[in-house]
């Protein structure tokens, strides 16, 4: 771990295990095919992140194969090239200090809304609970510079949602840690699917703003252990 | 088991095992993602119910993690907070003495009908067999008081259906015991899916009322061992 | 095996094993939920059939749980009540001597076409290969007498298809043996799904009758080992 | 290995293992049912290919069951009849020397586009990355002569896509090796599904040609290890 301060070695090892294990949730929840999709975690108290290497099969992901980058996306430790989406993850960590985990997938229903550049309307209590309103659409952005990261941050800053549908591309989700961001990725696909089915069926009835606010406030404070 | 009368200890232990095992049917039948969805059972001969704790992953559910509440939804035994839907389950047991099990999911097709506040019409012999007619829609109700429970009970009392689609929320099902309520949850999603596909395709042909009655009567008395 | 002639005991035992194993293909191919769906086999050289008992879970199906009936659907051997669809299977065996296996499911896409009482048009080479033309719709028939069996036989006699979509009910398939009928059940759902998707997308282009004939003839004579 | 030059025995053995293992990716990614679908690999430095035998179940596929044919599709080694699609694979290898692997499936979403004879438009960055533009439709062709192979080659030669949707039939994909062709088969179904969902939802926004070119160029040169 040449480029990593010694006092962080143990934390980095734990995060590699956690991030490797969380990658298994992506195929398990039908969010990815082949090697698409990636999970990262911020290394707390540092300018580092742990992320999946590029183009590696989900069967071959191990804690040891995870790579560590700084918040400019430069490789700090690891034998493989980091995910080609590392720059976008790094941009989010640089500009949203409250974020501890980022996930990107091309999950089919969420990506279908992204292809139409339509936000997912809030007509389900689950959307109000988890995302506090509609799931917003981010700009069309090419890979290769800060465009994707900037598009994610600018869109999420104006929303209570932890998910953004990047135009013609797919969802990015954030969370307090990597597990919370994976949960958001699972939930946004489930919501995208249910609302797609509802739109096919007829006219989904939107939930009133006051009810959304009440559901969101309760869920943030009451749910879970 | 401090709050539970000694003569019920064995029954409660058996129900914890049964309810824990039945939770595995929810992901297996694609009715839930992450921690959404819950199964409960009435403890016969008492004012108690067994239910899933809140926000616990399906992989981590064990008989020991199940909690026991009274029929006001107050925790009687268990180390964790009960499911946030416990008040709705408890209301059903208080007002429908014939019910021995309750299930709640956000299964995608049933929830899509709920988002449109449209009942599922009876155009399949399987719907007539299992539910005796269309699957009704319940009112929009916020969590936090008796609204959801009351909405379930008022809707099911006017129907032969064991399933109700709560508006913008998702299905609740009831049964003579927890297994029967889980079966109803599996069947209502299958029916919701098939009828959604039929609606996309063209015009599903409704079944005559007399034929529905005949199918329902036969199925209640003849089917199974 | 009290009601079965001794010289058939070994054949019946083999068929029980085969039919029990083939039932596992139904959930594996997403053709059934809970206990819906059943497979039967004719006992060659006799007026007997082997079928699934009623209302038994797919996890609990074993060769020993299979039941034997005569071709009037009367139980000849076994500890459980035969499937409630036994009369329909028996009618097919009585009237179609070339049939060695029958399968019934409520697979969702095929049943959606059945709910709309629309035949599945032949716009895929796979449909021409396997079924020689469109998949026909059978009449609406109530369970309890010969209506379902008669509807199946009358529809299939006028078609090259091994599958019929019984109105508002679901698909029945036939085959030279039970495995062939299960294959037809798997294929008809796959075809029903692809043609449903094609209809949602636009206008599926039908295949010319001469090409259908040529594909069907080749597949019957050339395919397989 | 009577018909195979001794210096190729080891290569052929390795390809049989690889091609047998890759067949498992087809059901795992929901691209096939029953025995439909096949993968082949060119034997480098020879006029031979390795392919699946006809009508064999995916559970029964082993390296030893793979067969070897020459590039006219004639069996050179193996105990079983080669896949009925061997002539089409062989034609591709004869006319596209850069191709090392070919895959054919009837995956449902890609086949739905093929049934409507509609190309899949490029409204997703993943399509631009992987296929460099829309997925083209090939001609309607009957099995039995060179028509299918010729249709594949003529269509792919005018496109950057590694996938072609053969009219009323299904997708064929090519790759530098068999694994690359399997990846293309997985990706084309995922893309076909997402674009189908987007079309159902509203109006997918196409990506500009210049952006497609930029994405395609980067992906060819930068992605992976």
Image (cartoon, coloured by chain):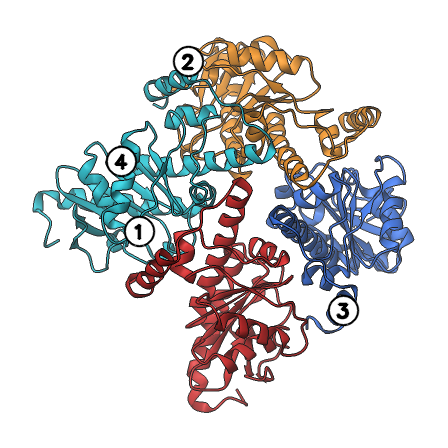
Chain colours: A red, B cyan, C orange, D blue
Q: Note whether residue B89 is visible.
A: yes
Q: Mark 1 points at which residue?
A: B142
Is tag 1's residue or tag 4's residue first in the polypeptide sequence?
A: 1
Nearest-to-viewer mark from 3 and 2: 3
Rendered location of residue D40, percent (x, y): 77, 50
Q: In this view, does B94 lie above or below A166?
A: above
Question: What is the chain letter for disc 4?
Answer: B
Q: What element carries label 2?
A: strand
Q: Name the residue under label 4.
A: B154
Count residues near mark 1 (Cα–Cα under 10 Å), then give few for <14, some for 14-19, many for 20+: some
CA distance separating discs 2 and 4: 44 Å
What is the CA distance from the residue labelled 1 to the residue labelled 4?
16 Å
Residue D177 placement: quadrant: bottom right
Residue C75, disc: 2
Which residue is nearer to you in this view: C55 or A215? A215
Q: Chain for mark 2?
A: C
Q: Distance between the residues labelled 1 and 3?
A: 52 Å
Q: Write down the chain letter for disc 3.
A: D
Q: Which residue is drawn at 45% across and 85% down?
A: A9
For the residues labelled 3 and 4, the Cα–Cα distance comes to 61 Å
> Circle 3 sits on which residue?
D220
| Front: mark 3 or 4 | 4
């Amino acid at each position: 771990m040449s480029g990593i301060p010694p006092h962080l070695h143990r934390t980095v090892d734990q995060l590699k295990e956690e991030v490797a294990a969380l990658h298994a949730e992506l195929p398990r929840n039908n969010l990815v095919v082949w090697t698409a999709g990636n999970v990262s975690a911020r290394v707390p108290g540092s300018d580092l992140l742990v992320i999946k290497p590029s183009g590696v099969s989900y069967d071959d992901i191990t804690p040891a194969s995870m790579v560590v980058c700084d918040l400019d996306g430069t490789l700090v430790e690891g034998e493989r090239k980091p995910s080609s989406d590392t720059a976008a993850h790094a941009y989010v960590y640089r500009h949203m200090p409250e974020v501890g985990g980022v996930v990107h997938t091309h999950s089919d229903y969420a990506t279908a809304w992204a292809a139409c550049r339509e936000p997912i309307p809030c007509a389900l209590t689950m959307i109000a609970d988890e995302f506090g309103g509609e799931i917003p659409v981010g700009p069309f952005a090419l890979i290769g510079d800060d465009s994707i990261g900037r598009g994610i941050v600018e869109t999420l800053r104006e929303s209570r949602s932890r998910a953004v549908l990047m135009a013609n591309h797919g969802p990015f989700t954030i969370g307090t840690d990597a597990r919370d961001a994976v949960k958001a990725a699972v939930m946004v696909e489930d919501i995208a699917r249910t609302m797609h089915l509802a739109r096919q069926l007829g006219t989904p009835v939107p939930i009133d703003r006051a009810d959304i606010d009440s559901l969101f406030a309760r869920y943030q404070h009451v749910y879970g252990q």
